Structure formats: C-alpha cells, structure tokens
Amino acid sequence: MNKAIQNAWEYLKGDKSIWLVVLMLFGISMLAVYSATGTLAYAKEVDSSYYLIKQISLTIFGMLLMFGTHMINYKYYSRIAQILWFISIPLLIYTMFFTKSLNDANRWITLPVVGLTFQTSDLAKLALIMFLARQLSQKQDQITDFKEAFLPILLPIIITCLLIAPENLSTSMILFCTSVFVMFIGRIAIKHIAALMGIATVVFSLFVLLLHVVPEKTLYSINKRTVTWKNRIDDFAQTITSGKTNEDEDYQVLQAKIAIAKGGLFQLNPGGSDQRNFLPQAYNDFIYVIIIEEYGLLGGASIVFLYLFFLYRCIRIVINAPKAFGALLAVGLGIALVTQAMINMAVAVNLLPVTGVTLPLVSMGGSSVIFTSIAFGIILSVSRNIEEEKSLETA
C-alpha cells in the first residue's frame, strides 16, 4: 500500500508542495462538509452521508481534471484562454437575461442533455485571468503605452466585471481588484493603474451613495439585488460603529460569532458543531467558522497558512518561469484563488460585509470545485514545464 502511494506520488508532476496543499484542503473539506451538512441532510430527508459522498465524487472528478490539465503544456493555454473568454461573454449575457432566478439572482445555467448546473461567473473568472495573462505577455514591448497596452488589456476586464456585477457584485469586485493586481505585476504603468483605481473608488462611492438616496422600491425595480447590497453594507457599518450586530437583519454574522466563541483557542471536536444547526450556508459560505468551532482558532489559522503557503509557491514559480505568459498565468490564478479564500474567511469572522463567495477546495460546491481544480492544474502545468526545462538543461 505504501509502495503504491509512493509510486502515485512520484507520478505527479509539478510543485509537490502545491499538490500537498491541495490534498490537505480536500481532506479538510471532507471533514468539514460531512459535519456541516448534517442539518441539511435531515431537512432534505436523506442519509447523513449523502452530501459527503457527493463531495467525494466531486473531489475525485476535480483531482482528475487537475491531473489532466497539469499534463498539458501551459503554452497551449494561451490560445485556450482566448477561446474561453469569448465563450464566457455570451454565456454571461444569456445567464443574466434568460435563466431562472434563485434568491433574486440569475447566476446558474443548466447544460442540456447532461443536466449539469454551473455558475457562468466561475468560468468567466478563470477565462479572464488566463486571457489577461495572454494579453500582458503579448504586450510587454509596449506595456507602458496607454493606447497600445493599457486600454486593450483593460477592456476585457471592464466587460467581464460589468456582466457579472448585476447578479454577483462581490465576485465582480474581487475579480476587478485581482485583475488590477495582475496588471501591476505585468508591468502596466503605475500612473495608469493609479488613475484606474482612483476612478473605481469614485464610481463605487457614488454607487453606495445612490443605494442610500434612491428609495428601496425604485432600487428593487431596477435590480432585485440592490436592496440586498444596501442591507449588507448597512449591517456591516453598524457592526463597525457600534460593535453590535442587528440580530434581526444579520442573523448569519451573529451565528458565526457564536461559532467562533465556542471554538476558543484550540479545540478537537470533529463533527461536534452546534452552530451548523442554526447557521445558513454552514457548508458553503460560512464553512470556515464551522472549522473554527470544531478545531479552534489554531485550526482556523492552519487554513490561512495553507493558502499563504500556496501563494508563496506560486511566487516561486514566477521567479523560475522563463516566459512571461507562464509567470503571469501562475501568479494570476494563484492571487485569484488566495484572494477569494481570504475574503471568504474575512467575511466569516466579520471583517468584511457578507459576500457569498466560497472557500476554494473546502466549501461544498459543484462548479466552484471544478473550475478551482482546473485553475490549480494550470498552475501545476507551469510548474511541471519549468521542472522539465531545467532537467533538459542539466542533462
């Protein structure tokens, strides 16, 4: 058995530390999802292991996708990125106007024949970061030019984020900030980035102002999600200013705080969460506080360490990458994943307003697990090719 595991481990290519992080996150996911879905299984009148089996199946599929994508030379992803981005745009438009609303949002699309449901924003995020890496690598000779580099690179970001924003504002904002950071790494002129961030800050401030000036009925008629955004901002502002949570309006935050308090500094009580019975989306958006409740703050800190260590390994890939596209591809996807993770955990501990983003590779999910696995696989593809090129040089 040990020999088989050793052979399988040696067969995996790329950065072994990243593979180890992936396996650890998937292992944590199994424990957390099984614990957090107990109440959901009872409510749906299914066996307590139903959602665990479902998550295991998704994990196996995700690992296969990760393995497959990491075996492809990362140079092919330049052309794939272009195709994926052009596909994602009509899919986002179709999702916005022609799909059924769930929780006042149109985010999901069902593929015909197979019946698979996924969030088109998950595909769009992956496609945009890959396409951004392609654009930046191709524009390196004119990278400081406003018309030749900055505008052509900025346009896909604006289009994608604007199409995601009406139904998933938090994801759009995270994707925009991630893209700007990748532009910075890609050597876009600082003055252009500073101007962009200044304009974005003004636009966001005006947007928040309008949310509080325009009557709620009017907001709701424009976009059903606007009232939700306003309430989340107000609830978070009240928590910051008064230190108190509005129990009626921010039930999730209150239950999350209780879970954190029960966890203490150190806990070893797998499956012993009480707040999973009260906390909505305990298996998804707020799975981090379930982990803290069962394993304490040290257990929660270990999750933060794993993501930061993964980001460090991505930076190491960038340092060793001989081509700009590989470096930007690895760091872009790495930053996107780690940023999403940090925001999810910050929301869970009430450092940010509720957003609804998942914890990569840990939260229970469908399309999020699939596209996250693909992103990890692409990063590992860059790492694998760097190792192969080094071995050829030393041969």
Image (cartoon, rainbow, N blue to C red):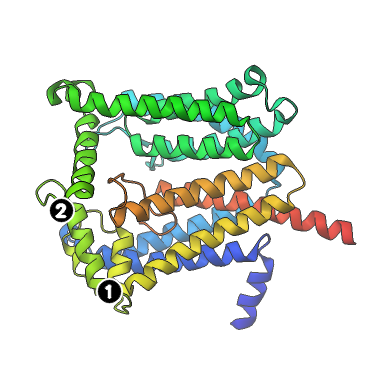
Residue beneath label 1, please?
264
1, 259: nearer the viewer: 259
Q: Is residue 395 above or below residue 204?
A: below
332, 35: nearer the viewer: 332
Horizontal side of residue 293 vs 342, given as left or right: left
In the rendered view of the protein, which quadrant contains the C terminus? bottom right
Disc 1, SS: loop
In which image quadrant can residue 329 be found? top right
Disc 2, SS: loop
In which image quadrant can residue 19 be found? bottom right
Q: Residue at x 55, y 59 (%)?
A: 310
Q: Residue at x 14, y 23 (%)?
A: 215
Horizontal side of residue 177 vs 104, given as left or right: right
**Disc nearer the start of the sequence (1/2):** 2
- Callout in the foreground (1, 2): 2
Q: Amino acid at mark 1?
A: Gly
Q: Residue at x 81, y 54 (%)?
A: 389
Q: Which mark is residue 244?
A: 2
Q: Amino acid at mark 2?
A: Lys
- x, y percent for residue 282: 26, 58
75, 43: nearer the viewer: 75
In which image quadrant can residue 212 be found? top left
